[in-house]
Amino acid sequence: MTFPAPAVTVTAVAGVPEVRAGDDLAGLLVTALRDAGLELADGDVLVVSSKVVSKAAGLTAPAASRDDAVVAQSLRVVAERVTPTGTARVVESAAGPVMAAAGVDASNTGDDAVVLLLPSDPDAAAASLRDAVLAAWGRPVHIGLVLSDTAGRPWRVGQTDFALGACGVTTVEDLRGGVDADGRPLQVTVRCVADELAAAADLVKGKDRAVPVALVRGSGAVRADGAGARTIVRTGPEDWFGLGRVEAVRAALGVPPGTAAALDVGIPAAWPEDRPTRVARAVRVALRDQDEVAADVGADEVELSGEDDFSAGLVAARLLVALHGEGLAGTVRRGGRAGHAAVVVHAPA
């Protein structure tokens, strides 16, 4: 037996004016819906850019202190790279998701002097906005609301919108234990419905259109007891990607990301770097807190001299690991006298 595919429509809600601190955001959304001739119906989902929620709540910081704002909004640093405009960091944000710059955003702020911060509790912000929209609408209707934001994804080019906060919607649909259309058992399939709603809405709204709201109809995702979006953030034992590859290597050598130690030895750049630069940084990482050993860095060989064979050998081993973090490799050659060793760098530049 076949069943008709559900019809899902995504409609941009145009006409929302520039939102400023203290504005009645729910009132602005309801006015825009009515001016566009759109009626809220049971089962509808409003997808609202988190940016307008931040604007209405006055969640801003001076643009000149953007880096400080990123640090303040971060729980931990996952990866970091030097860029022409500063240090770019992927972090676990205070708002929940792992994302670039903790969601601190300088685009479409309405004021070049400020950057926008994410709500500290996006699910609560979504619930509060939905309740306010329903109150302003004036008659009962069962709808869901998703606060959307934008982020990249590991191993994929570009960005997409995702659910930062959610209220009254199915966040995930766990299909494990069921069967596919051919009757084969489903063992790993868990649909992230909230993210699918956010991504679908971005097809009709977006930063370049100045349309921060979309109405999604026919998704079948509205439910009274829907869990919030924080429940779909993987942290702790479920997080297989707690650090970037380079950061994991450096952290194992006592140089975790987002620390003074990382700044002291140097942070890798976002662009390709030459071999001498990478070797020199690997040496600084290897020598971190190893004061009894000195290094003479040559073009293809690093000579180590220490108080004894053990100390020189320890730093040589650390250097091999640090070189791996730089995409290089080496081999250890024992020096001609006690307390000396050499690491030959032989990976291609």
Image: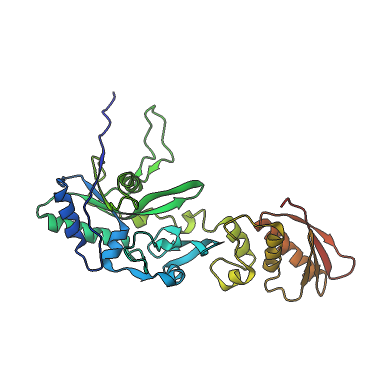
Going by the image, does 281 lie left or right of 160?
right
- Whole-percent x, y for residue 333 in the image: 83, 59
Going by the image, does 77 lie left or right of 171?
right
- State whether residue 221 is above or below residue 109: above
- Residue lying furthest front in this view? 112
Frontmost residue, 243 versus 213: 213
- Whole-percent x, y for residue 241 in the image: 52, 54
Residue 98 position by quadrant: bottom left
Frontmost residue, 187 versus 166: 166
Residue 320 position by quadrant: bottom right
- Image quadrant containing the N terminus: top left
- Whole-percent x, y for residue 267 in the image: 60, 65
Going by the image, does 324 lie left or right of 342?
left
- State whether residue 295 is above or below residue 322: below
- State whether residue 286 is above or below residue 245: below
Q: In this figure, what is the number of numbered marks?
A: 0
Residue occupying the point 84% across, 71% down: 339
- Whole-percent x, y for residue 168 in the image: 24, 52
Residue occupying the point 13% across, 58% down: 135
- Residue lying furthest right in this view? 336
- Residue lying furthest top in this view? 1
Q: Identify the coloring.
A: rainbow
